[in-house]
Amino acid sequence: MRKQVVFCAGHLLSPSVASGGDVLFCELAARIARSRPEWDVVALAPDFARADLERFFGRVVTFATGPGEGSQGSPAKVMSTWLRRLPFAPRELSALKPDLVHSTGDFFIDVWPVVFARRRAQMKWSGVVHHVNAPPHRRKNEPAVAAVSYALQRASFVALRSADAISLLNTGVRSDLERLRFDPARLHVVGAGIDIERFPLIPAAERTRRVVWVNRLEPTKGIEDLPEIVRAFPDDVVVDVVGRGPDVHVARLRQGLVQAGVDSRCIVHGFLSEQELREVIRRAAVFISCSYEEGWGISIAEALAMGLPCVAYDLPSHGEIFGDEIRRVRVGDKAAFADTVNQVLARGDTDEERAARRRIAARHSLDACARREEEVFAALLS
C-alpha cells in the first residue's frame, strides 16, 4: 500500500516559492518523491501557491484564501492572514489522513493544524526548526514584532515536543532545543544544500565593481545596516539587493538609502527568478550578508558555487557550515564589514580561488540532504 506524505505549508504568503526555507522543502520533496515512488508526496498550501508548487509536487491540495492574500504586507497583516487560515488546514489534513505529515516551518499555521488533525486521525509527525529566536530585547527587530514572534515560536515548541521527529539545519539549533528539554532522540540534523550544477562558475575576468545582497527584506536580515555599509563603499560600486519582504520594511530600506545618499547606486530588485538571480550574481565581484540570524545560508552557498568571495556577519551557523571559506565580521560592526568588503574589492581574485570556493559549495549537496530527510521519514513510516 502506498504511503502518503503531506508537506504542510500553510504559511506561504506569495504565489512564488522564494525564501531559502521554502525552496529547500520543495527541492527535498521533489527528490524524495523520485527516490520513493511508493510514497505519495503531497503539498498542502494556500490556493494561490498551487502553480509554483506543482513544479516540485506531483499533487498539490489547497485551501481557499480570502481577498488580498498572496502578498506579504505588514507583520500585522501576516498574522491576521495566518489566523484566518487556521480553521482550514486541519480540516484538509484530517480529510487526507496522511501516514506522515511534515511541517515545513515552526510557524503556528504549520504546527497547530497538525495537533488538531491528529485528534481525528492517526498520523506520524515530522517537524522542522530552522533557528531558535533570541529573546525580544536581543533580537534585531521592532520590539512588538520580536515579542510576538518569540511568544508564537515558544507556543509552537510546546506542540513540537509531541512530534515524532524534528529536522534541523545545524548542530547549534540542536543544542538550543536540547536546553529547552526536547528529546535528543527525536532531533535530526539534516542540514541544507544546493544543486551546484544550476550555479555555473564565473571566470574572474567577468567581475565588475558590483556587490550583491540576497535575503528577505526585514530587520533580522540586516537591512537597517545596509545604508551605512553602502555609504562606506567607493562611489563607483553598485549594490544589487535581491529579495522580498513586508512593504513597511521595503519602504524603510528605500528611505534609509535616500537618507544615506546612496539610493542611486543601490538597486532594490525585489524577487527575481533563479535565472535572473544568476545573472545578477554573474555581474558581481563580492557577495555580502549582514544578517543577524541564519539557520544555514543557502544564498551564500550559491554565491560560492559561482566563485564569488563572500563577506558575512560571524554567526554560529556560518562558522559551522562555511568556516574560514567566507570572510566573517563581528555581528553589527558595520564599519569593519564595509572595510572588509573594500579590501576584497581592491584585492581581486583568480580563477584558481574561484574554483576552490566552488569546491567548498560542492560539499553541501542537496541530494545528500534529501537522503538524510528521507531516512527520517522512512524510520517513522516503517
Image (cartoon, rainbow, N blue to C red):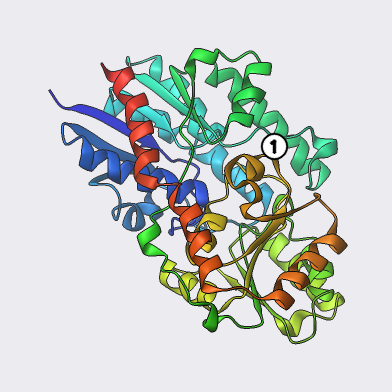
Could you say whether the residue bearing mark 1 is in a helix, strand or loop? helix
Front residue (pair 67, 27): 27
Q: Is 132 on the left-hand or right-hand side of 24?
A: right
Front residue (pair 323, 278): 323
Look at mark 1 in the image and give the residue it sits on.
Answer: 149
**Residue beneath the point at 74% across and 77% down:** 346
Q: Is residue 196 above or below residue 152?
A: below
Q: Is 216 on the left-hand or right-hand side of 99?
A: right
Q: Is residue 307 something that shows in the picture? A: no
Q: Position of residue 205 (x, y in %)?
A: 53, 83
**Residue beneath the point at 57% across and 80% down:** 207
Q: Is residue 220 above or below residue 188?
A: below
Front residue (pair 336, 214): 336
Q: Is residue 381 above or below residue 297?
A: above
**Residue beneath the point at 24% across and 40% down:** 33
Q: Is 356 on the left-hand or right-hand side of 367?
A: right
